[in-house]
Amino acid sequence: MNWLSVLGVDDMLARFRALLSESAIAAEDRMDLLAIEWQEQKKNLIWLVLMGLVVAGLTIVALTVLSGAIIISFWDTPNRMLATWLVAGVWLVLWLGVLAFIYLTTKKAANPFRLTKTVLRQDWQAVKGRLK
């Protein structure tokens, strides 16, 4: 006679093994999701660094051109002044465009691993529900 079956321990062990197997599969899926989101986060960080360098370079150029525009605006010809301010305006627009791109990239990167956190939170709620 199998005392484990009579006492109901056999069924409990089978359920425990099934739960362990499902947990292992779920953990593997979560690790895959984490790897995918890490790649996305890494890409955002690389773009952020590159655009930071671009903004630094454009800031130097924009300030140089702006300084030239101020100096030239005191010269005697109005055409020089108009051309210089147009060049300075173009640099300013480019600088603002890169700054906007950095802002949007930072916003996207502000909540890293969002999907992984959501799935793990749902898993934890399911485990807590099974334990009750």
Image (cartoon, rainbow, N blue to C red):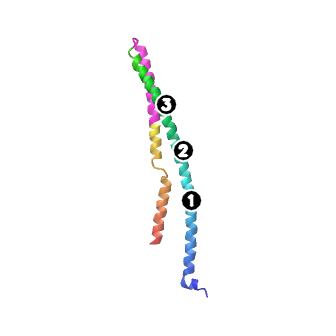
Q: Is residue 87 magenta?
A: yes
Q: Is residue 121 magenta?
A: no
Task: Please report whichever mark, 3 or 2, sits nearer to the chain's N-terminal start.
Answer: 2
Q: Which mark is residue 57?
A: 3
Q: Nearer the viewer, mark 1 or mark 3?
A: 3
The residue at 56%/76% (across/down) is 13
Q: Which mark is residue 43?
A: 2
Name the main secondary structure of what is drawn in magenta.
Answer: helix
Q: Position of residue 7 (x, y in %)?
A: 54, 84
Task: Please report whichever mark, 1 or 3, sits nearer to the chain's N-terminal start.
Answer: 1
Q: Which picture quadrant has residue 100? A: top left
Per the image, label 3 sits on a secondary structure element best described as: helix
Q: Which mark is residue 83?
A: none
The amino acid on which the numbered mark 3 sits, given as a three-letter code, is Gly
Q: Nearer the viewer, mark 2 or mark 1?
A: 2
The residue at 48%/67% (across/down) is 127
The amino acid on which the numbered mark 1 sits, given as a three-letter code, is Asp
Q: In the rendered structure, which segment of residues is drawn in magenta?
A: 75-99
Residue annotated with mark 1: 29
